[in-house]
Image (tube, helix red, strand yellow):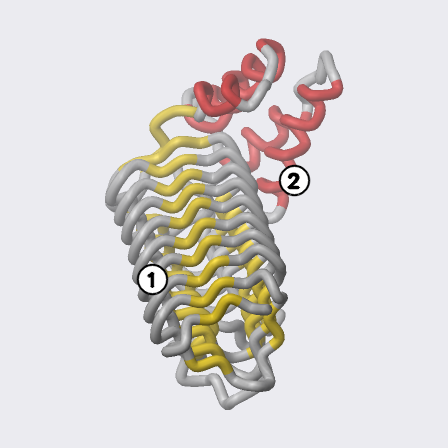
Amino acid sequence: MTRIHPTALVDSGAELDSSVEVGPYTVIGPHVRVGAGTRIGAHCVIEGRTTIGQNNQIFQFNSLGAIPQDKKYAGEPCELRIGDRNTIREFCTFNIGTAQDQGVTRVGDDNWIMAYVHLAHDCQIANHTIFANNTQLAGHVHVGDWVILGGFTVVHQFCRLGAHSFTAMNSLLFADLPPFVMCQGQPAQARSMNFEGLRRRGFDAESIRAVKAMHKLLYRDGLTLAQAQGSIAELAPSTEQVKEVIELMTTFLDQADPQRGIVR
């Protein structure tokens, strides 16, 4: 039998696995689905068309699945989808998507999301990320795997953050942050590459040398973005992992918006 506290209000239309735990005074709406092993703390509100996967831990005082803070929203049946094994700390707000995008706000697997984080409509969060306290993402932001956002990071709408990138506390992003790049400032500026993070994740010396070479081309050689892209594309991969590292960067840069640009 589902372990639901007697003071919780769970709509009869909600679908909860029998192993789900629901804390006191939590409210769960009719279109919510929650997978096995997920624990939901006290005083949460989970509403809208929200799907939550398995083995997540959702702490007290969270608001998940509310309508977007977008005046264009007109009641369309948009969604919030959360994957597996995520930790969501206190006072976070995740909104559903909008019809102007894919209609879905997504959070992947194995993410560590600290207190007071806001994910606006249509954000797409990949896997293994860490969002420190008070990280604020505007609408349509895309965040790649293994990204770490320092406390009070603020990201402008439609920005993209590449895999393995890293922001310092109080960073303010108005442009795309390429893979591997560490940034800091208001507005954010590139400071280095996330070499220590790559070592911890098993990247070999050749791959890290390739990341250093791309950093030099992007930020040290005085090249335009187009010139740096061309030079990065010409780098010769010595191993399969190096090839993947270079392709991760070139694919990201190829998709950069010419008006928004990248963090420089």
| Image height of 77 relative to 172, above or below | below
Closer to the eye: label 1 or 2: 1
Q: Give the residue displayed 58% in from the left and 40% down from the top.
A: 253
Alpha carbons under labels 1 and 2: distance apart: 39 Å
Is 73 in front, or is 22?
22
Is 136 in front, or is 264?
136
Q: Give the residue displayed 46% in from the left and 53% down from the top.
A: 57
Quadrant of the image for the C terminus?
top left
Is 43 in front, or is 160?
43
Q: Position of residue 130 (x, y in %)?
A: 42, 42
Residue type, label 2: Thr
Q: Position of residue 29 (x, y in %)?
A: 50, 81
- Marks 1,2: beta carbons within 8 A: no
SS of the residue under disc 1: loop
Tell me if 147 is positioned left or right of 151 in this view.
right
Q: Residue furthest top?
A: 205
Look at mark 1 in the image and give the residue it sits on.
Answer: 60
Q: Residue furthest bottom?
A: 74
Q: Give the residue displayed 35% in from the left and 66% down from the top.
A: 42
| Image height of 180 relative to 42, above or below | above
Q: Give the residue displayed 57% in from the left and 86% down from the top.
A: 12
Look at mark 2 in the image and give the residue it sits on.
Answer: 251
Label 1 vs 2, first from the N-terminus: 1
Residue type, label 1: Gln
Callout 1 environment at 10 Å: few (<14), some (14 to 19), or many (20+)? Answer: many
Q: Position of residue 186 (x, y in %)?
A: 24, 45
